[in-house]
């Protein structure tokens, strides 16, 4: 079974279509089997991602994003494209590209 993410039902069809169109080899799995869980955004300040959780509309630090890509077995570029789709901003970039 390929590495995968879990999604709230409201995001499943959109993200599945995106993954298929983009050719990103990531499965949408039940929460108990997924390596990373995507959560719907909350009202208020954006939540920050950790090693296994991506809050849609939130933020993620660059080193965590790189580790998450490795955990999922996808390229950093593919994870970046998924983050863009989920409107998750990268900060603390190790190359200075993102403040």
Image (cartoon, rainbow, N blue to C red):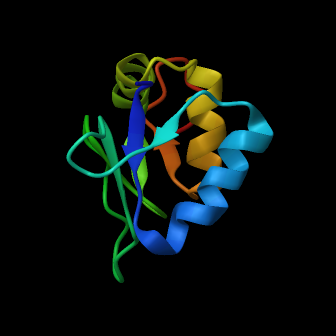
Comparing 42 with 27, the one in front is 27
Q: Is residue 71 left or right of residue 83?
A: left
Q: Is residue 29 left or right of residue 57?
A: left
Image x and y of residue 22, in percent: 76, 37
Tell which residue pokes out farthest to the left in this image: 32
Q: Is residue 60 left or right of residue 50?
A: right
Image x and y of residue 92, in percent: 42, 33
| 78 versus 50 height, above or below | above
Q: Residue at x 26, y 51 (%)?
A: 31
| 36 versus 38 height, above or below | above
Image x and y of residue 18, in percent: 71, 49
User: How many numbered discs sit on the rendered protein?
Assistant: 0
Q: Residue at x 56, y 21 (%)?
A: 76
| 78 versus 19 height, above or below | above
Q: Quadrant of residue 25?
A: top right
Q: Residue at x 45, y 71 (%)?
A: 9
Q: Residue at x 49, y 64 (%)?
A: 57
Q: Is residue 34 left or right of residue 88?
A: left
Comparing 68 with 19, the one in front is 19
Tell which residue pokes out farthest to the bottom in this image: 43
| 46 versus 48 height, above or below | below
Image x and y of residue 64, in percent: 34, 29
Comparing 28 with 66, the one in front is 28
Q: Quadrant of the N terminus?
A: top left
Tell which residue pokes out farthest to the right in this image: 21
């Amino acid at each position: 079974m390929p590495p995968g993410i879990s999604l709230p039902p409201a995001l499943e069809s959109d993200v599945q279509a995106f993954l298929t169109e983009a050719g990103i080899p990531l499965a949408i799995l039940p929460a108990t089997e997924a390596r990373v869980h995507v959560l719907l955004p909350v009202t208020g300040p954006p939540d920050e991602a950790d090693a296994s959780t991506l809050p849609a509309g939130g933020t993620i630090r660059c080193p965590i994003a790189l580790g998450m890509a490795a955990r999922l077995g996808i390229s950093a570029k593919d994870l970046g494209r998924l983050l863009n789709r989920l409107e998750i901003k990268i900060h603390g970039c190790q190359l200075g590209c993102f403040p």
